Amino acid sequence: MAAAMNLTGLLAGLVAATMFGVTAAGAQLPSASPAALGMGDNYTALARGFGAVAWNPANLGLPGNPRFSLALLGLRGSSDLGPISTSDVARYQGVALPDDVRDAWMRRIEDQGGEQGQLGGGVTYVGASLGRFAFQLSSAVTGDANLAPDAMELILYGNAGRTGTPRAMNLAGAHVSGALTTTAAISYGRPLELGIGRLSIGATAKYITGNALVHGEDGGSYLTANASEINVRFPMILSDTGAGSSANHGRGFGIDIGGAWQSGPLTAGLALQNIVNTFKWDASSFLYKPIDGFYGADTSYSHSGTALPIDSAPPAMRDWLGAQRYKPALAAGVAFQATRALIVTADLRHELGDGMRLAERTHAGIGAELRAIPFIPLRVGVSTAADGWALAGGTGLEIGPVNLTLSGQDRHTTNGRSPAVALGVTIGTR
């Protein structure tokens, strides 16, 4: 084991870190509007029709809301691997990794506390609105993964390590988790006649189903300096997906509320998502796999066989499962129609707690849409979050009531760059 793994082995290790890792606009409901990503997800005051379900239901009661809108199979996805990105790995695929590059990678990994992977996605099967009512059915995937610095040192150098002298390796800190949920939501917006511009209030009722979840974390794995002992401990909990099992491993209801105001070219919106949310995972439908192994000169064993009831899992893992809830999130946004062809937006959002998520805990940004050619919108947006910033853009083609939309985003974080894309075909009538 003194020799380092080749780059193919490294790539396999990096991909393994991201296959289960996921991160994921707003609460557990992905945005059904692909245009939102093109404006940097600064859409709280601008969303209309089916798009208002995920952003602010009060917008359904404002002027400019379509009489009818429909979206089918809208897709959104993002990926993040860092601090060593997939492009870093691809650059040296099939060739020997230079020592100076290997050392530079290792320093970056140590600075960030490990190699981290994230992959997020959402699909809106159907989003529709009819007047002040709207509906959305979507699925979303969330989670994250991490390989500890010592684990990456093993991949890059073998057990000889960076110095060429074998040393003990501690793999603590490695973890992987991922979840799939499906949400059905219905929204209503009601205008208010108060004589101070156009006011509206709205609410969204949601039913959330937990389809699948897996979580594993290192339980004290190590490798001795002379490789005479290798101890692997990586217990996991996972939803039971065996034959005859249900695809419902968690459930609950949620409520969002919102308000919106429009006067002339200015629109402002405020939404509180998950003001009530009863979703929780059903622990009784989960299993525990105590994956462990020991390999020594005289004794060796491994155990990753039959899964056990969740009650056999360590208390910390059962507590982790119970903590996977949706927390309230507050969103505020403004939109200003500067000219007939240009609209500018700004958003500020913050999640009030630490639980399951699709988006960043805190978001601040601005976006714009320009229609120099009326049926070809050009969109751009920039945003900041706790771990970096993002630049987004997009365009579309509007043929009568049919809109073809494509948006993309390049997010820069402490781990590296994270691309995202959204696309869809929508129909809307004024």
Image (tube, rainbow, N blue to C red):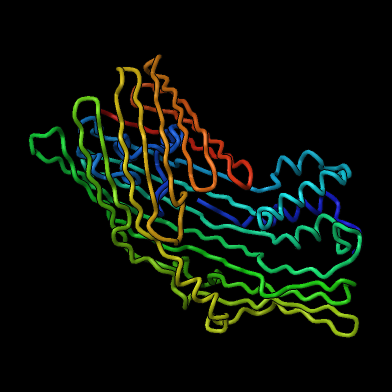
> Residue 265: x, y in percent?
24, 25
Estimate the x, y position of residue 168 in percent, counting from the top left: 82, 70
The x and y percentages for residue 203 are: 24, 50
The number of numbered badges drawn on the structure is 0
Seen from the viewer's position, the closer of residues 376 and 403 is 376
Q: Position of residue 9 (x, y in %)?
A: 81, 54
Inspect this view and state whether residue 424 appears: no
Name the one closer to the observer, 189 or 222: 222
Residue that extends furthest to the top in the rendered view of this protein: 373
Q: Quadrant of the N terminus?
A: bottom right
Residue 353: quarter of image: bottom left
Q: In which image quadrant can residue 250 be found?
A: bottom left
The residue at 11%/34% (across/down) is 196
Where 249 falls versus 130 (above or below)? below
Q: Is residue 410 above or below residue 351?
A: above
Q: Residue at x 84, y 74 (%)?
A: 224
Among the 4 quarters of the image, the one containing residue 148: bottom right
Q: Is residue 120 visible?
A: yes
Camera-nearest residue between 313 and 348: 348
- In the picture, measured across the screen, residue 238 lies left or right of residue 153, that is left
Q: Is residue 127 left or right of residue 311?
A: left
Q: Quadrant of the C terminus?
A: top left
Q: Residue at x 89, y 62 (%)?
A: 160
198 left or right, relative to 161: left
Above or below for 174 versus 38: below
